[in-house]
Image (tube, helix red, strand yellow):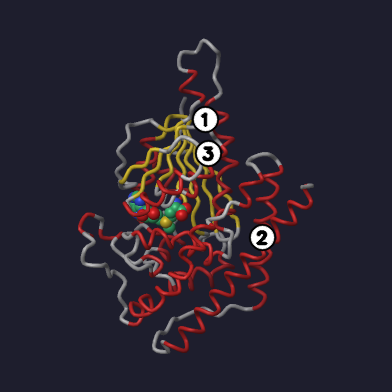
Amino acid sequence: MPDTLTKLAYQAFQEGKNYFGLGHKAIATQLRLWLRPNIKFELKSITPEFLADIDRRRQALIETDWQDAEAGIYDKSLLFDNPWQDFFQYYPAIWLDLPAIWDRAEDKQTAAFDPEIDTTLYPSYYRRNFHNQTNGYLSDLSANLYDTQVELLFGGVTDAMRRRILKPLKAALSASTTPTSSSDTQSLQRVQPKLLDVACGTARTLRMVRQVLPDASLFGIDLSPAYLRKANQLLSETPGTLPQLVQGQAEDMPYRDDFFDALVCVFLFHELPGPVRQQVIDEAYRVTKPGGTFIICDSIQRIDTPELEPIMINFPELFHEPFYRDYTYDNLSDRLTQAGFTEIDTEIHLFSKYWVARKPGA
Ligand SMILES: C[S@@+](CC[C@H](N)C(=O)[O-])C[C@H]1O[C@@H](n2cnc3c(N)ncnc32)[C@H](O)[C@@H]1O
């Protein structure tokens, strides 16, 4: 297909997902207002000008995504990669789950779990119905619905936001893993970089990193056994070496010091209390090799996009996110510096902010 056609197809694909997401949210909201009028949210009103601004930012993200594919950072096929099987299999379950979500919203329950789930195994900040999900992160149903739910929330650009880590990641790895000479005894190790996805969830990020960096040794860690099961299932569907997935806490990781060439962490920090954010960054520093890179992708923050405040007020109100407000004021660059990271760069794309930080040395 000529490139202009591929670009048009990609733009049309994104428009389709955006309108589907808008339609889904509008119908779900209308149903709630009819069926559960007692549920009240304190929401900041959204003006047409604000929506137009969001749409401009969304188009800019899609253009950047296209440009990075054109530049060969990743293959254009990645632009069309979508969790279709989950969508067709589990989309009805998203509607069927709504009454349970409304029940909890009406009763103001934010930490409700089925009795067979042993929540005592997890830290208290984690034992919650994040995003109002039934059983939080601790059931197979939650893991099966997650990717589709996030896509509906973000209007189909979740992977486009995740992909923004790939350019700095490739740049960092090519700088730190080029072998110095063929006789270098460590050259094999050095051209096979080790990369960890912290809080990998269902492994959407690992899946794309595996395609972009086929020679890398990939690792993933997450607290949820159900999400790791789902990650294993999704990663097994495509060819390539399976990443090593481990259940564990990001603030106490089972890896030795200076082990990884790069760490990435997507959409975790806004779900952690402030002190735990620092612990995770300190732990990321410990396991990163000198000269290695840590890349964070997470929500935008009030400290640099105050004009998008209505979203940052409405998101935690509608979707249970107990640490989000505090996160939006938290200067992660200061926290990275406190841990020892240097050369910290930040970027913003639509609803996401990125930090690229280097561990000095090497
Ligand atoms: C919003 S999801 C993001 C998942 C994935 N990175 C993505 O891009 O979709 C947050 C993930 O963080 C995991 N998580 C939360 N707290 C954690 C912790 N302290 N240690 C490890 N994983 C954690 C959850 O189980 C969940 O999979």
Q: Amino acid at mark 3?
A: Glu
Residue at image mark 3: 343
- The picture places residue 246, in percent across and down from the top left corner, at 33, 42
Secondary structure type for disc 3: strand
- The picture places residue 178, in percent across and down from the top left corner, at 56, 23
Is residue 269 shown to the viewer in this render? Answer: no
Q: Nearer the viewer, residue 83 or 41?
A: 83
Q: Is residue 110 above or below residue 173?
A: below
Q: Residue at x 32, y 60 (%)?
A: 139
Q: Mark 2 or mark 3: which comes first in sequence?
A: 2
Residue at image mark 2: 13
Q: Residue at x 41, y 34 (%)?
A: 288
Q: Nearer the viewer, residue 198 or 362?
A: 198
Q: Is residue 171 above or below residue 24?
A: above
Residue at image mark 1: 215
Secondary structure type for disc 1: loop
Q: Is residue 125 above or below residue 279?
A: below
- The picture places residue 230, in percent across and down from the top left corner, at 40, 52
Locate residue 8: give its quadrant: bottom right
Q: Mark 3 or mark 1: which comes first in sequence?
A: 1
